[in-house]
Image (cartoon, rainbow, N blue to C red):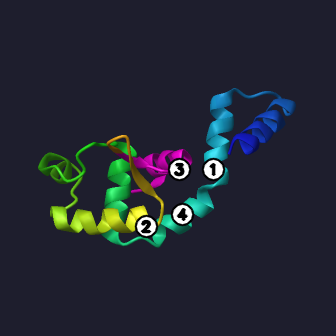
Amino acid sequence: YSQKLAMLHFDLMENGGADLTVSKAELVNSEASDFENIFVNLAANQKKVLKAVARKPTASIYATDYLRENHLGAASSAKTAVEKLRALDLIENRDGLWSTVDPLLEKWVRVHSI
């Protein structure tokens, strides 16, 4: 991603300039089709868990308040979704916090997923 971001930023600057924010948005957009393919192939509850973790990383993914706030259903359903998302390397528990593995996927999910 770093090299691609640098290339996109360089190209945008050559064509009249752009700030880094525009280049970052372009990078996310350039990966959108891959992210869409990942997202559409997830089960409904897996999508909900991924969206929840992308929007609000948490230490307590199975906490009643978090489950309720994100419409994740029962803890057992969320657990099944979490296990699958971990197996797909989409989310992880790093230093006690559940978050997405890929920061660009996180940005895409925050903006594009319904």
Coordinates of residue 23 in the picture (x, y in percent) = 69, 36
Residue that appears at 79% across and 27% down:
17
**Up-down: is 90 above or below 76?**
above
**Up-down: is 5 above or below 49?**
above
Q: Count residues near mark 3 (Cα–Cα under 10 Å), then give few for <14, some for 14-19, many for 20+.
A: few
**Amino acid at circle 1:** Asn
Element class at badge 4:
helix
Q: CA distance from mark 2 to mark 4?
A: 18 Å
Q: Nearer the viewer, residue 12 or 1?
A: 1
Quick check: 113 left or right of 18? left
Q: Does the residue at mark 2 contact the one at mark 1 (Cβ under 8 Å)?
A: no
Q: Count residues near mark 2 (Cα–Cα under 10 Å), then give few for <14, some for 14-19, many for 20+.
A: few
**Amino acid at circle 4:** Glu
Residue that appears at 20% across and 53% down:
62
Element class at badge 2:
helix
Element class at badge 1:
helix
Foreground label between 2 and 4:
2
Foreground label between 3 and 1:
3
Q: CA distance from mark 2 to mark 3?
A: 14 Å
Q: Which residues are magenta?
A: 98-114
Q: Count residues near mark 1 (Cα–Cα under 10 Å), then give few for <14, some for 14-19, many for 20+.
A: some
Q: Nearer the viewer, residue 1 or 44?
A: 1
Residue where numbered disc 1 is placed: 29
**Amino acid at circle 3:** Asp
Q: CA distance from mark 3 to mark 1?
A: 14 Å
Q: Earlier in the sequence, mark 2 or mark 4?
A: 4
Residue where numbered disc 3 is placed: 102
Which numbered marker is on residue 36? 4
Asked if the magenta segment contains residue 99, the reply would be yes
Residue where numbered disc 2 is placed: 87
